[in-house]
């Protein structure tokens, strides 16, 4: 068997013995020509300036002219995604408890140790402190009572009343909203 390249020039000779082709390279040298782009891609997108040195080591010749621009894959690989700027929510509030955000989560298929299947989460925007109260359903009365308990706790701790109560306007927060408006 002969493996031939351009102009029917023999590159590798082999013989079939016991069902296997045996290849003897000996002093055979393969003369392979690659364009700059082919060599760049073949060598894992190495820098263009490295290709002449690597072509001598790997025994191939570069044909054509050296490209002036970077390939598309290299350009995309060098792009970085800009980080999302961190906006400090502390600029919105000067003191703890000024803005409290609330959200109901649930119902969950797995119940808590006290047989509750949901919770309401209250977050102080200034300190990012989170209060979670387990509930059994979206009962607006229970959510209002939870908010009253947390509001009293914050009032005792910081002596600052909650000025803003932010929700997603779900029906479950109607009772809490009425409580906040009374204050």
Image: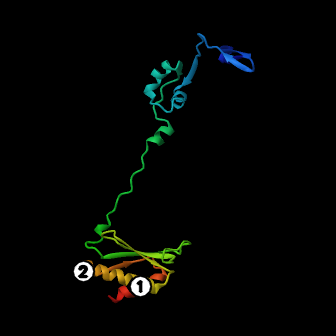
Residue 89's spot in the image, x, y percent?
32, 67
Residue 109's spot in the image, x, y percent?
56, 72
Q: Is residue 176 visible?
A: no
Mark 2, residue position = 159
| Residue drawn at point x = 39 percent, y = 53 percent | 83
Residue 24's spot in the image, x, y percent?
64, 13
Looking at the picture, does residue 114 appear above or below residue 36? below
Q: Is residue 114 visible?
A: yes
Distance of mark 2 from mark 1, alpha carbons?
20 Å
In the rendered image, the quadrant that contains the C terminus is: bottom left
Label 2: state its secondary structure.
loop
When asked about the image quadrant of residue 16, the answer is top right
| Residue drawn at point x = 30 percent, y = 69 percent | 127
- Label 2 packing within 10 angstroms: few (<14), some (14-19), many (20+): few
Q: Find out whether the residues at labels 2 and 1 contact each other: C-beta distance under 8 Å.
A: no
**Quick check: 11 left or right of 123?**
right
Earlier along the polypeptide chain: callout 2 or callout 1?
1
How is colour applied across the structure in the image?
rainbow
Residue 56's spot in the image, x, y percent?
49, 18
Number of numbered callouts drawn:
2
**Quick check: 53 left or right of 19?**
left
| Residue drawn at point x = 44 percent, y = 30 percent | 47
Label 1: state its secondary structure.
helix
Q: Nearer the viewer, residue 60 or 121?
A: 121
Looking at the picture, does residue 115 appear above or below residue 47? below
**Quick check: 24 left or right of 115?**
right
Q: Nearer the viewer, residue 139 or 169?
A: 139
Looking at the picture, does residue 64 appear above or below residue 154? above
Mark linked to residue 102: none
Mark linked to residue 144: 1
């Amino acid at each position: 068997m002969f493996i031939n390249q351009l102009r029917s020039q023999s590159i590798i000779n082999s013989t079939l013995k016991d069902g296997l082709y045996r290849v003897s390279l000996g002093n055979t040298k393969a003369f392979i020509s690659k364009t700059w782009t082919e060599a760049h891609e073949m060598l894992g997108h190495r820098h263009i300036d490295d290709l002449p040195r690597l072509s001598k080591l790997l025994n191939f010749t570069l044909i054509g002219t050296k490209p002036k621009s970077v390939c598309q894959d290299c350009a995309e690989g060098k792009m970085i995604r800009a980080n999302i700027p961190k906006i400090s929510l502390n600029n919105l509030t000067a003191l703890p408890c000024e803005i409290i955000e609330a959200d109901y989560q649930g119902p969950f298929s797995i119940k808590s140790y006290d047989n509750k299947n949901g919770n309401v989460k209250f977050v102080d925007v200034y300190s990012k402190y989170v209060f979670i109260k387990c509930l059994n359903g979206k009962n607006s009365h229970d959510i209002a009572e939870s908010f009253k308990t947390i509001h009293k706790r914050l009032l005792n701790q910081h002596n600052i009343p909650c000025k803003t109560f932010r929700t997603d306007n779900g029906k479950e927060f109607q009772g809490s909203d009425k409580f906040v408006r009374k204050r």
